[in-house]
Image: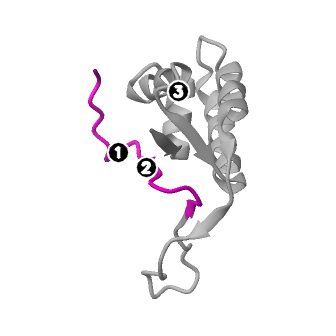
Amino acid sequence: MRVVFDANVVASAVCWNGESYRCFMKLVRRQIFAFGTIETLAEASDITSHLIHTENPRHNATARLNWYLEKVKMVDAAPLGKQRSRDAKDDRIWLPRWPRTQILLSATTRICWN
């Protein structure tokens, strides 16, 4: 399965051992393949680095983050449909140019573990 991890999923997986970390373990076992753009990786790196410095986890969270940044495959962003908001300053929705890429979001995704 091809996935794009939200920055919050990356931060959670790097700092704690919950459901997001289980997604990382699927990445380790090559059951899923992570893809990202320069922008999504920069956001994930910034948020996670800040969280590492504020929460100070007991394990080596920086090594986990660096491992993820090395394993994710880089793709180019492509616009996803028309802009939905009337707000001109609102961000457009972008997805990687990869067919049938699924997005895992921390708050809304239910994961079935085999």
Q: Nearer the viewer, residue 93 or 33?
A: 33
Question: What amino acid type is highlighted by mark number 2?
Answer: Gln
Alpha carbon of mark 3 to alpha carbon of mark 1: how far? Answer: 19 Å
Colour setting: one colour
Indicate whether 13 appears above or below 79. above
* Residue that label 2 marks: 102
Quarter of the image that includes the C terminus: top left
Mark 2 vs 3, N-terminal side: 3
Mark 3 vs 1, N-terminal side: 3
Q: Position of residue 31 (x, y in %)?
A: 46, 26
Dot 1 crowding, Cα within 10 Å, few <14, some 14–19, many 20+: few
SS assignment at label 2: strand
Q: Position of residue 59 (x, y in %)?
A: 61, 11
Comparing labels 2 and 1, the label whose residue is closer to the camera: 2
SS assignment at label 3: helix
- Residue depicted at x 73% and y 31%: 70
User: Which dot marks residue 52?
Assistant: none
Question: What amino acid type is highlighted by mark number 3?
Answer: Leu
* Residue that label 1 marks: 107
Please indicate whether residue 108 sits to the left or right of residue 38 in the image.
Answer: left
Dot 3 crowding, Cα within 10 Å, few <14, some 14–19, many 20+: some
Please indicate whether residue 101 sits to the left or right of residue 36 in the image.
Answer: left
Indicate whether 93 appears above or below 51. below
Alpha carbon of mark 2 to alpha carbon of mark 3: how far? Answer: 14 Å
* Residue that label 3 marks: 27
Please indicate whether residue 38 sits to the left or right of residue 109 in the image.
Answer: right
Q: Which residues are magenta?
A: 95-114
Indicate whether 87 appears above or below 94. below
Residue 60 image-quadrant placement = top right
